[in-house]
Structures are given as C-alpha cells and as structure tokens.
Image (cartoon, grey):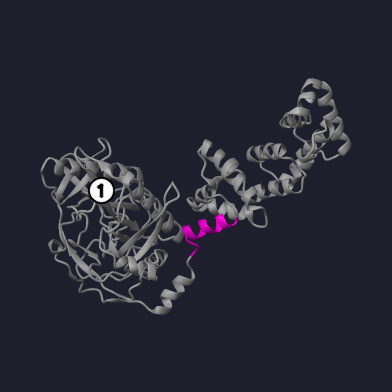
Amino acid sequence: MNEHALARAREPIGSRRAAPEQLIRGAADDWEVIVGLEIHAQVQSRAKLFSGASTAFGGEPNDHVSLVDAAMPGMLPVINEACVEQAVRTGLGLRARINTTSRFDRKNYFYPDLPQGYQISQYAHPIVGEGEVFVDMADGERIVVGIERLHLEQDAGKSVHDLHQGRSSVDLNRSGVALMEIVSRPDLRSAEEARAYLTTMRLILRTLGTCDGDMDKGNLRADINVSVRRPGEPLGTRCEIKNVNSIRFAGQAIEHEARRQIGILEDGGAVLQETRLFDARTGETRSMRSKEEAHDYRYFPDPDLLPLVLDEAMVERVRSSLPELPDEKRARYVKLGLSPYDASVLVADVAASAYFEAVAKGRDPKAAVNWVNNELLGRLNKEGIAIEASPVSAAQLGAILDLLAKDVISGKIAKDLFEVVWTEGGDPAEIVEARGMVQVTDTDAIEAAVDEVIAANPDKAEQAKAKPNLAGWFVGQVMKSTGGKANPKAVAATVRQRLGIEG
C-alpha cells in the first residue's frame, strides 16, 4: 500500500467533512450525509470459487450445479486459483495491500439458496487490505475514497416465487460463484459522490477484466450504508440498503434514506440500525430486518480449507500484467492535448478508449478524438449501436484522417466519405478515387470560383473591406459552389487577397 493510502487508513473514520453545498437542509438544521458502500462484484472466471461448475449466465435452472454446490455429503471445497488471481489483480488495481496469508471462514446464516446452510467467506483475515480509489467529479474535483478491505466469498443461489402458487423454487446456478466484496470507508458525502464512486469502481473492474460490471444481470450490486449527522457531530446510526443493482437507484436510495433519517431525528426520535430495501417503483426504502452484527453470524475458520498463502512471485507476476488504470489513462490523454472532458468520455468506456488508441496511433490525437467522440460516438448513440459493432472500423476512420491530413480531401468531403463508409463500407482511399471526391487544390480553379462569388455579390464585397469577418461568408459560398471540394485554406487565403483584407 502506498504512503498516501496508509496515511488515510490512520485517519479517524468519518473525518472527511462535506462541502457547504452538500449539506441537506432540514426543518431546523443543516445535516451531513455519510455514505459507505459494500460492492459485490462477481469474479470473471469460467468455474465457481470452490467447484468446477460453470459460471455461464442464462443456463436452465440448476444446470450449473456440482456435487459441491449441492452440498452432497463428503464433498469438499477446492479453491479456484483463477479466482484468487482475480482478487489479487483487483486489489492491486485499487492500490491496496495484498495479504499474502488469508483465511476462509464459515458465516452461519439461514440461506434457503445455499444448500450447505452457511456461506464460505472471509472475515478477520481478508485477501486484500486497505487501499484507495480516485474519483473525478463532474465539476473537476477529485475525491479520494478509502478501501477498507476486499474479501472473497460464495454467492448465493436464487429463490423464485412466481412459478407455482404457494410454493417457492430454488435455482442454484449462481450458488458458489465467486464474489469479491469491496468495502469502502464512509468517505462519501452525497448521492452524487456515491454514483460517481460506483461508476469509477465499475470502470476499474472492467478495465482490469476481473468483473464485467453488468448490473442488469446482478454481476455487480451494492449494499449502501447511510447515516446523517449535524456538521461536527460524531457519526450517527447507520442503516444498510441491500442489493442495489443500478447506479441511478443508488443515488435515489441515498437521497430518500438521508431525508427519512433527518425527519426521525428532527422529530426527536432515534434511528434504528437495520437493513432496508429500496423500492424502485416508489423511490423509497423500507425495513427488511434488524441489522446483524458479526457475532450473529458465528464466524469460525472453515475446517475444510487451509489458510490461503500467496507466493510473492505470484503477486508480482499479476502486478506486472496490470493494464493502465483509468485515472492514469485520463492523465495521459490530457498530456496528449485532449481536453479533460474528451479524455473523460473516452476513459469512461473501455471499448471507446481502445478504438481511439487505434485511430490515434501515429496521427494527431486532437483530430482523432474529435472524430471519435463527435462523429462516431454521436452517430452510434443516435442509432443505438455499441462501438464494438461500429460500421466504421478504427482502420477505416484512421484512413479518412490520413486523407484529411494530406489535403487529399476537405473536412466537408471527409464527412461525406464517413457517411459512405458507414452505409456501404469499403476502403476510404479507393472510394475517394472512384467517386472523384479528391479536394480541388488547383490555384487557377480556386481563384476563378472566388472571383465568381465576389462578382455576384459586389455590395458584400465592399462591406467586407470594413468588416473583415465577412470574409468567412465568401469562403462558405465558394465551398458551396465547389461542392465542398475546394481546399478551405486556399479558398480563405484567396478570398482575403481578392478583397484586399490583410492578415
């Protein structure tokens, strides 16, 4: 763990103060909301944490269940090394301490969809310790969120209540799938910060390739701890909102829960520590059960599993394979000359970033980002197409930029060419040659076109001598008359020369 993260780990819990504009106005006082998240991320692996059963999504109910998952007598769990590596990889991506010795415990609780009647998890000795995440807000502020721990555990199965009237069914396909539970410090001070943190965490996990972040499938979900206090007071009693599977819902749940607690406290009541659920239909949270503590689960070391001891060489091997992290990539893009906004748009989408890298290789990065962010992503979003299925490949867009850079085509022709490639495909250079889309650079032809436009508009030509900005109107008319084929720079220079405008 780096020195910054270590210093943060020593800070008192809840020491960060909310900005004045983040305070919630109650009936009598201002209130500060304190938020911490426990993210449950399904590990990307082909097999489950302690069995060889498939983790594929969408199989028939109970089709991906081994004897271990079904808790048949005499069946013993065997740790999946790939899941361990994914946890280490995630920990390194969170700039966290990797614990080379960790331990699995039994968490005793009634799980109708975990046949063994307990969950194999990690409690006192997790595989990953303290770390930190940088979260860039929309206003340009960067906040640092401390990570308390990351531990591995089994996911539960799924109870189905609508197949048979009066009876419930159980699908164990998900039972035993590896989860990483990533616990943050209570460093977040608004619903907006929590949404940004969730977005950042999902991007980090996708970049690392350790979780696909698909919240619709339940592969990434969050338990949200919310409390409120008057500024300067100790931390209040927290309530946990379970299994929120949408970033938008997370923000709504925090906002409702904070106001619910403020209302209770301002009426002279006390907030009860409990577990709650968020109802997306009403936008409200409702009580689920009283909040359990660690002793309620009666943790004890799992007797079927030895302590997990990692080799330092293995940790270093994983470290050496880490990709560039999102905040590092964003800083590199800004250094290349991209605006912070353009850099953030690219970094927010792993596929878009990879596409940009391919287009920008050996080319002007500013020109590349303009075409990727504005022309390509704009068109893809409009038509609801994922960038992976883009009709225009990175190689094709790069070829269009090459033709532009060599003055073979103008910006107007480039947009027409992009449309042709989008709808018909093909090699941009061959299309330009076959359709006569080459830019007009012949000086005589450009001068003739300029003279023709000036002759047709003598009044405007006279006005332009007093108002040089009118030269742009003449340039537009010439480009229009030439079908966008004239070299814009040559046209602009000729217009100013013919009108006698200096500079």
Image side of residue 178 versus residue 265, left or right = right
Helix, strand or loop at disc 1? strand
Q: Where is residue 499 drawn, in percent x and y?
A: 82, 31
Q: What secondary structure is the stretch in magenta mostly built from?
A: helix
State the quadrant of the N terminus: bottom left
Residue 407 shown in magenta: no
State the quadrant of the C terminus: top right
Q: Disc 1 marks which amino acid?
A: Glu
Image side of residue 135 versus residue 465, left or right = left
- Comparing 44 with 329, the one in front is 329
Residue at 44% x, 71% y: name it.
318
Residue at the farthest front position: 466
Answer above or below: position of 143 versus 103: above
Q: Is residue 436 visible?
A: no
Q: How many marks?
A: 1
State which region is magenta. Answer: 323-336
Q: Where is residue 302 drawn, in percent x and y?
A: 21, 71
Q: Is residue 354 visible?
A: yes
Residue at the farthest right position: 444
- Comparing 451 with 69, the one in front is 451
Answer above or below: position of 418 versus 210: above
Q: Which residue is mark 1?
A: 32
Q: Quadrant of residue 62?
A: bottom left
Answer above or below: position of 496 versus 400: above
